[in-house]
Image (cartoon, grey):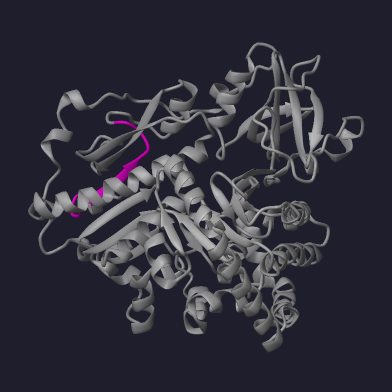
Amino acid sequence: MRILLFASAFNGLTQRIFEELLASGHDVSLELALSRRHMLDAVKLFKPELIICPFLKQRIPDVIWQNYLCWIIHPGIPGDRGPSSLDWAIVEQQPQWGVTLIEANAEFDAGAIWGYEFFPARKTYKASLYRREVTTTASHLIHNALVTYQQLGSAPEKYNSPTVKQGEWHPLMRQPHRHLNWLVDDTDTLLRKLYASDSCPGVLDEIQGQLFYLYDAHIERTLKGDSPGEIIATRHDAICRATRDGALWITHLKPAPHDNQSFYKLPATQWLDQQLLTVPDIPQTELPAPNPNTWQEISYSELDDIGYLTFDFHNGAFSTAQCLRLLNAYQAACQRPTQVLVLKGGTDFWSNGIHLNTIEAAKNPTMEAWKNIKAINQVTEAIITTTDKLTVAALNGNAGAGGAVMAFACDYVVARQGIITTPYYKPMGLYGSEYWTYVLPKRVGEECAQHLTEACLPVGTQRGFALGLFDAVLSERTELYWQQLHDFCLKLSETKYWQHELLQKQHRRQLDENHKPLAVYEAEELNQMWQCFNSQTFHNARHVFVYKKEPQQTPLYLAPHRQQHQERNQEPIHNMTIQAIEPENKKEAVV
């Protein structure tokens, strides 16, 4: 089918739907819903048979949904309506929640239902529920609805009976609903409000006389303070604030706009540096064991001669300091008497590469970018040159840019079904490093490596396995995934297999080094990156990303309809008549 996607951003959900539809053989194009005009133009150019809206904040123009079948993913149960669905579900402590696939009509979130599914509502922040349960469920619903559409041609009656609808209308959740009353609210209540607001819009709160948006909260069960709301400790750029019955870690802050100036999210202490001179800093050890009673970025555990190294950096971004902490932890883990070392990444992301926000905040962004790329290269080099263990990258969450390439530096890459990798740098105006010119060709060949970095398209687990990026794709169910991963690693650690693979690995590494040293690969890449870091293209792209500015147009590599129009050099789209939007058979006939 010819399927057009409308999206407010090319986020993780949109990437997954885009990639899976392509992998299923559909002719897919995407239009960022930047305006009514953009959406009308896309329909005129692409002439879709179906429009899907995985993540859409804007209203679909009437002339489109009146003439084309449009599906909207709503992150709520049947009958739930409104723009803050997940926010209210978290605050109200719903034990289960769901996703509904709705046909667009004149009324907000009230069209015919094409499918719905429920899921247990984990006690976690909104963005995590969205990236995992909502994204997984939405993918299932769209694939099932495509089968239904081809078989029935209309929304199933069983989904549209009055008894199905269990939700209700909720208004937009505003800051007064999210207000943190440190003197009255207990820790769990504060945490729910913070969870419901992460990663957008954050919770507006006052810290030492200044208004900030708060992000990424974690419970602390061992520290307490005398005055609720006060900062009682710091750790690795996060702050710990006392509650009336405990404490919470807050890892990131963003100042509220003032004096006609907007700001961006940074590790908390970077906005509060001078105010924290008397606050005790309690960093963790180099290789801490998992501790559910406090917040940890890095932790390490062992089971059956297998080491598991977790690094859960906010949104998968690795600052220079985080890279160096991870390098120290990796080197310490390599000293442990294990045969296999598993790099687990974090809950929602494995890694997304260098930290653009901390680069933007630096006095000299060019030099900070240079330090950051060299630091993440050190981690990647340590992985590549580990010759006394087998290394496994366990992609439980998405991986992007240099973070994806760092994963491919491991001996084995295992992915949870449904995760997305974006192993390219071009949209940020970068050539790329992390030894990609060595790592990617070894896995997929020179031609494919060049294509992956130039095409800038997301890679799902089905295509990634076929290309050789992944050595195994395991269950999408988290608990089963971890068990299957451990079983996979147990097989690697079997004495005869492990010894054979280790000898082969040592032999290949020596041959590769004799052919072309790693230092040469890095020097060639860094030569290109130095030019990129000094270019206005990188500074502009980084600025747009950090300040969350709306792009001017949909990138052509995501929008074949615009690319083809540009190549044909036809008349300007805006000169085409509005009547061109109507298909030969209107939606009524199609459905």
The N terminus sits in image quarter: bottom left
Q: As drawn, which residue projects farthest toward the top? A: 184
Tell me the residue at 52%/53% (across/down): 490
Q: Which residues are magenta?
A: 65-77
Marks counted in the figure total: 0
Tell me the residue at 22%/57% (across/down): 50
| Residue 84 seen in this snapshot | no
Q: Is residue 11 left or right of residue 30?
A: right
- Residue 320 pos. (x, y %): 77, 57
Q: Nearer the viewer, residue 359 or 483?
A: 483
Tell me the residue at 64%/19% (across/down): 187
Vertical comparison of 303 with 565: above or below: above
Q: Is residue 82 magenta?
A: no
Query: Where on the picture, by quarter, is residue 473?
Result: bottom left
Q: Is residue 288 left or right of residue 565?
A: right
Vertical comparison of 102 with 582: above or below: above
Q: Is residue 72 magenta?
A: yes
| Residue 187 seen in this snapshot | yes
- Residue 291 pos. (x, y %): 68, 32
Q: Nearer the viewer, residue 481 or 199?
A: 481
Q: As drawn, which residue projects farthest toward the right? A: 278
Query: Where on the picture, by quarter, is residue 57?
Result: top left
Q: Is residue 286 left or right of residue 134?
A: right
Q: As drawn, which residue projects farthest toward the bottom? A: 515
Q: Nearer the viewer, residue 386 or 395?
A: 386
Tell me the residue at 33%/83% (across/down): 568
- Residue 474 pos. (x, y %): 42, 53
- Residue 12 pos. (x, y %): 46, 52
